[in-house]
Amino acid sequence: MALVIDAGGWIALERGNANARARYALAIATHERVVTHGGIVGQVWRARGARQARLAHLLAAAVVEPVDDALGRRAGALLARTGGRDVLDAALVLVATDGDEILTSDPADLAQLAAAAELTVDLIVV
C-alpha cells in the first residue's frame, strides 16, 4: 500500500494541515511508500520561503514518478473514457495501485478517474 499525494495534498501538508500531516507521518513511520509524479511537483513548487523548505523536506521522502510518454498516453486514454480534462489528475490516479490511499482536495474528480481505471483506492480529503 502507498500514500499517493496530489497537489492539494501537498499544499495541505505545506500549510500544516493537521489531518494531512498525521496521515503523512503515519506513512513515514510505517515505511509506507509516499508517491506523486513530476507534474504534481510542478503544480506546487515555487522555490520560495519557509513553506517551500517544508515542502522540500516532505518531498524528499516521496517517490516522484516521471510523466513520460507511456503515462501521458494512458492518462489521455483515461480522460477520453471519463470526459475529464486534467491530465495531471489522471496521471496521478494511474500511479496508484489497488489498496492505495490518495491524499487530495479534489475527491470527486479523482473518484471518477479511479472508477474508470478500475482501481480501488481510498480518498483522504484535506
Image (cartoon, helix red, strand yellow):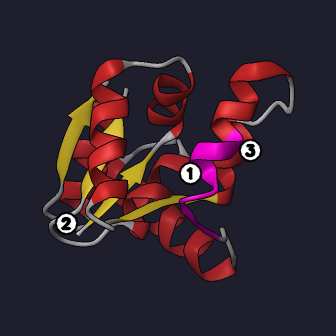
The answer to whether 100 is drawn above or below residue 9 in the figure is: below
| Residue closer to the observer: 80 or 94 | 94
Cβ atoms at labels 2 and 1 below 8 Å apart: no
The three-letter code of the residue at mark 1 reads Val
The quadrant holding residue 42 is top right
Outermost residue toward the front in this view = 29
> What's the residue type where badge 2 is placed?
Leu
Decide: few, some or many residues near mark 2? Use Cα within 10 Å; few <14, some 14-19, many ≥20.
Answer: some
The numbered mark, 3 or 1, whose residue comes first in the sequence reads: 3
* The label number, if any, that marks residue 109 in the structure image: none
Q: Is residue 16 magenta?
A: no
Q: For mark 2, what is the residue? A: 119
The residue labelled by disc 1 is: 87
In the structure shown, which secondary structural element does the residue marked by tag 3 occupy?
helix
Q: Which mark is residue 42?
A: 3
Mark 2 and 3 residues: CB-CB less than 8 Å, in contact?
A: no
Q: Which of the pair 124/53 is nearer the observer?
A: 53
Q: From the viewer's perspective, is the residue at label 2 or at label 1 nearer?
A: 2
Q: From the viewer's perspective, is residue 104 above or below residue 73?
A: above
**Of marks 2 and 1, which one's residue comes earlier in the chain?**
1
Q: Residue at x 34, y 44 (%)?
A: 25
Residue 38 spot, x, y in % from top left: 68, 58
* Residue 112 figure quarter: top left
Is residue 22 rendered to the left or right of residue 87?
left
Q: Position of residue 65 (x, y in %)?
A: 59, 70
Q: Residue at x 55, y 59 (%)?
A: 61
Q: Position of residue 60 (x, y in %)?
A: 64, 56
**What residue is rendered at 76% in x and 21% in y?**
50
Numbered range of the magenta stretch = 56-65
